[in-house]
Structures are given as C-alpha cells and as structure tokens.
Image: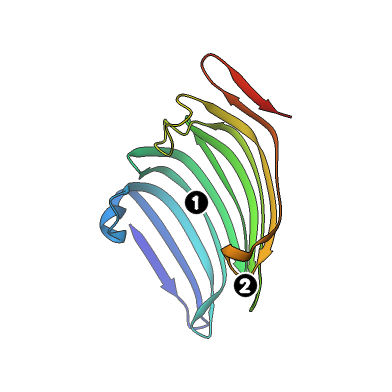
Amino acid sequence: DLYYSLSKNNVFSCNLNTKSININKLFENNKFGTLSADIVGQGRISSGKISQADIKGHINDFDYNNYKYSNISLDVISKNNKITGKIKASDPNLDFNMDGSFQNNADRSYVTIKVSINHLKPKAINIAEKWGDADFQGNIVADLKGSNLNDMQGSIGITNMVMQMPEDAFEIK
C-alpha cells in the first residue's frame, strides 16, 4: 500500500507498506527483484521541489543481483540541499552501521561517511567471487569534496580491517 497526502501549505506525508512489490518492473532493471518494506516520510515542498524531508523505515527484504537482503533500517533527513542519515543492515551476509551526509552547493559537493562493517561476505551477496568465502570487517571514514566524482578530493581511512577466510586471515590495524 502507498499513501500520499499534500496539504494546502505544501506539507506532504507518505507511507509505503508492502509485503512484496516487484521493483524490477518499476525500474526496468533485471538486477532488482522484490521489495518488502514499511517506510514513512514527511516534509515540505517549496518552489516545486522538496525543500525538507524526513524519511524513516525498515526494509524487511530487498532483492538485488540475485540476493535477498534483509533487515535494513534507515533514518534520513534532507533540508537546505543537505542530506544526513543513518542506515543499519543486519543481514547475515551484510551487517553494517553507516552515518553520513551529503551537501550539494552550486559548484561543490561535500560527502562525509562513517561505516562500521561487522560482516561483509562479497561472494554470498553476489558482488565479487575473487576472495571466495571471505568475511570482511572494519571501519571506513571518508571526508570528500568536489564538483563531481572525477575531481573529488579529501581523505578515506580504513581501520581495523580484517579479511577472514576459511584457512587464513589478513588484518590491517
């Protein structure tokens, strides 16, 4: 079910509650499958654009690239060209917490991200087979700015990284 309302003073609210919607058909992309989620949003529209939004929700499961991700929470706020948010995934093969922000000014964008990865199994989620059954853990912190992806400058730090394989482990401390 999808509910949407817009008041006379341009305040909107929406609620998506679905047990299974085929987003492959929506995006015409075969990598997508079905989505089961409960997401609530509210905000304001100014000059024909969303000037403020607050989105909270839980994705029960989501198919992408022949893997069914499960148990993903999100809490995102958008205001004055800045998006801040938190995403938490508690999937058996992808377990992480991410805090971040993105601000887009006329000539420059700013990105800050902090990710704590408890489990990332690339083969299990069909993103890479290179490392076999490896399980990655670690922390990533990024602080970048630029006018586009090709000229981004800043820093990216990786700490406490562990690649655990069935027979061996590799660590960066």
Query: Which circle marks residue 23 in the picture?
Result: none
Q: Residues within 10 Å of mark 1 (few under 14, many from 20)?
A: some
Q: Residue at x 48, y 72 (%)?
A: 12
- Residue lying at the far bottom in this picture: please name it: 47
Image color mode: rainbow
Q: Percent position (x, y) of residue 171? A: 67, 26
* Residue 15, above or below 95: below
Q: Which residue is mark 2?
A: 81
Most foreground residue, 18 or 136: 136
Most foreground residue, 20 or 92: 92
Q: Which residue is mark 1?
A: 57
Q: Residue at x 48, y 58 (%)?
A: 40
* Residue 69, above or below 44: above
Q: Earlier in the sequence, mark 2 or mark 1?
A: 1
Look at label 2 and name its amino acid: Asn
* Residue 41, above or below 137: below
Q: Percent position (x, y) of residue 155? A: 72, 52
User: Could you tell whether 87 is left or right of 155 in the image?
Assistant: left
Q: Secondary structure at mark 2?
A: loop
User: Could you tell whether 63 is left or right of 54 in the image?
Assistant: left
Q: Residue at x 47, y 67 (%)?
A: 13
Q: Quadrant of the N terminus?
A: bottom left
User: Could you tell whether 118 is left or right of 49 in the image?
Assistant: right
Q: Percent position (x, y) of residue 75? A: 57, 53
- Residue lying at the far left in this picture: please name it: 25
Q: Residues within 10 Å of mark 2 (few under 14, many from 20)?
A: some
Q: Residue at x 74, y 29 (%)?
A: 173
* Residue 66, above or below 74: above
Q: Secondary structure at mark 1?
A: strand
Q: Residue 83 is drawn in which quadrant?
A: bottom right
Most foreground residue, 76 or 127: 127
